[in-house]
Amino acid sequence: MSLTGIWGLKKIAMRNLSRHKVKTVLTSAAVMVSVAVYIFLTSWLGGMAIESRRNIVNYDMSAAKLQTALYFERSDERPSYENFRGWERYRDALYGEGFNSAPRFVFAGMLFSNSGSAPMIFNAVDPVAEARVLHYIDYVDFGRFPESGKFEIAVGTTAAEKLRVGIPTRPRRLELEEFIANTAQNETDAAFIRSLYEPGKTSTGFLNFSTEREFAGNERMILTRNAPRADLDRLWELIAATDRNNVRINAVIDIKAVPEIIRIGQWNGELMPYLREEDKALVEAAYTREDFVGGYLLVEEDEAVQEKILAAMIRAGFRGAVRHVNQLVDAVVVGVINSPDPVPNGNTGYIPMDALQDEAGMMLDGAITELLIRKKGAAYAELPGETESAAAITAALKRGLGEPLPEYLGVFFWLEYMSDYLGYEAMQTGAPQVIAFLLLFLSFLGISNTILLAVLERTKEIGMMRAMGMTDRQMIVVYMLEAGFIGFIGSVFGMILGCAVNYPMVVYGWDLSAMADSLGGGIGFRVTTVLRSVWNVPVIFGSGIVATLLASCMAYFPTRRAVKMPITDSLRFE
């Protein structure tokens, strides 16, 4: 069929639309709503995904990490024994190649206060270097970030609430009065503290996720959101004068060391079966069996060989090669972090690395577990690309060092670390999009139903047109054009409505902080504050095109069925 013929059939399709205005408007409205919902949901979820990834890079991961390969393999366990020294040369090499870097020693433990305890992930950091790579330091809600050389710690808001350190943000009234009694030095201070709190909302309106019961005389009190910074600093000074912020770190530091003696049971059951074949000869040559010690005694004295033996034992997962040292460190909470990313706001602590080097700290002895890396001048909204990939950074290190990285070290891109989260993110964004697409598809079923009813109502008319010489193919094209016009009209208005609804989400966003607080600091994605949508141009125009084509195709089957009726039967149809 020529384009001229189709253009002539278009007039018949347009006439049908004008003859049945109510059906045209209602069906187009269904398409409009479906397209608008699909555009809005896709743009919103896309914005949430992009914001989550920015938060991961800017507040937690950086672009890449330099670590030992074994640490990366066992990163879920946070094996503090997988550390390395001499990191300064890598830092200097990276700086000369256009990258900033920040050393960290990460370890797990418990943090105890006078009022509670919490399991924690501790990050021993260089405050100056950390500020060049990550942005969470700018989000110290109360107090300040720890200073180098001091036994000070900043904790996330979740940990602060569990430990009852810092400024209470959501205390019960009786808890607030107890806090005032322990903090205020006089009645003026007490009145000042009370002025910073207000009763929490007890309504159960839209998006109120609270499940708490209210008790008369002990209702929930909320720290005023717009409290002046000067007032918060004054309150922090009052708290600092008490012992409320005194805490104790209890952690086990794992130290790698070649064992002097290996018991026979360990040798036969835990070590030899798990060694690689090429490592067995190395280990066997380094030990001799001595019955008087009840096991195997280390006889190898060469330190280089011992390093190879230690590496072989660690690869085999031999527990005897790791010595556990329990450490207790007293510190003072000097700041509470409330960043756009829920991870720094959780059970996370940041403490100066240089304060933990000797036996008074964590016996780090100059070692780190990771070196965070980010390109100099990287924009906040810019996600790491090829110039910050593992390959690019590895090549930069090779140029800066004048030699390749040691085999036991590797550069790992942030996407490699976050593969599990990205899978979860795909699930979170995929389900609503499927629902929106089903809604879109249901509207097209409505179009199919509308065309079917139209065909039934116009059966006699169709018979007359066929009797006058119109072919079955032309009849099908007429009704496909009619349905396509309905889809086109609905799509155009749907695109306009979807963009109109999406506009305030792009410009102003939606403040999720209250919801995140109610849900314990997170909503499933890596966002806690204002969430903004994005303009997903391919989806906006693509949904309109697909909706038009799909609407047209949905008219094919009912029309094809109708034209199979003999012309004589069509003319007699009532």
Image: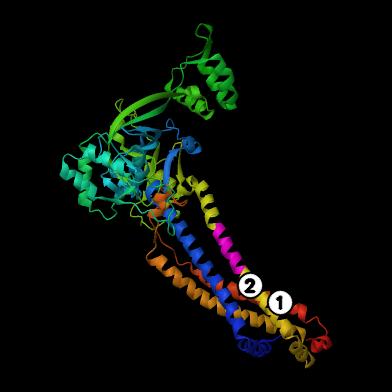
Please provide percent x and percent y for residue 81. 43, 30
439 part of magenta stretch: yes
Identity of the amino acid at label 2?
A: Phe
Bounds of the magenta span? 430-441
- Residue at point 64%, 76% (across, down): 447
Residue located beneath label 1 in the image: 556
Classify mark 2: helix, strand or loop.
Answer: helix
Label 2: which residue?
444
How would you rate the neighbour count of disc 1 (Cα within 10 Å): few for under 14, some for 14-19, many for 20 or more? many
| Cβ atoms under marks 2 and 1 closer than 8 Å | no
In the displayed image of the protein, which residue is found farthest to the top?
292
Q: Which of 83 and 419 is in front in this view?
A: 419
Front in this rendered view, residue 261 or 507: 507
Q: Please, is residue 185 above or below residue 421 in the view? A: above
Residue 431 image point, x, y percent: 56, 57
Nearest to viewer (mark 2 / mark 1):
2
**Local crowd size for mark 2, using a 10 Å CA cut-off: few (<14), some (14–19), many (≥20):** many
Assign a secondary structure to mark 1: helix
Task: Judge by depth and name the residue closer to the eye, 342 or 445.
Answer: 445
Q: What is the chief secondary structure element of the magenta stretch? A: helix
Residue 368, picture quadrant: top left
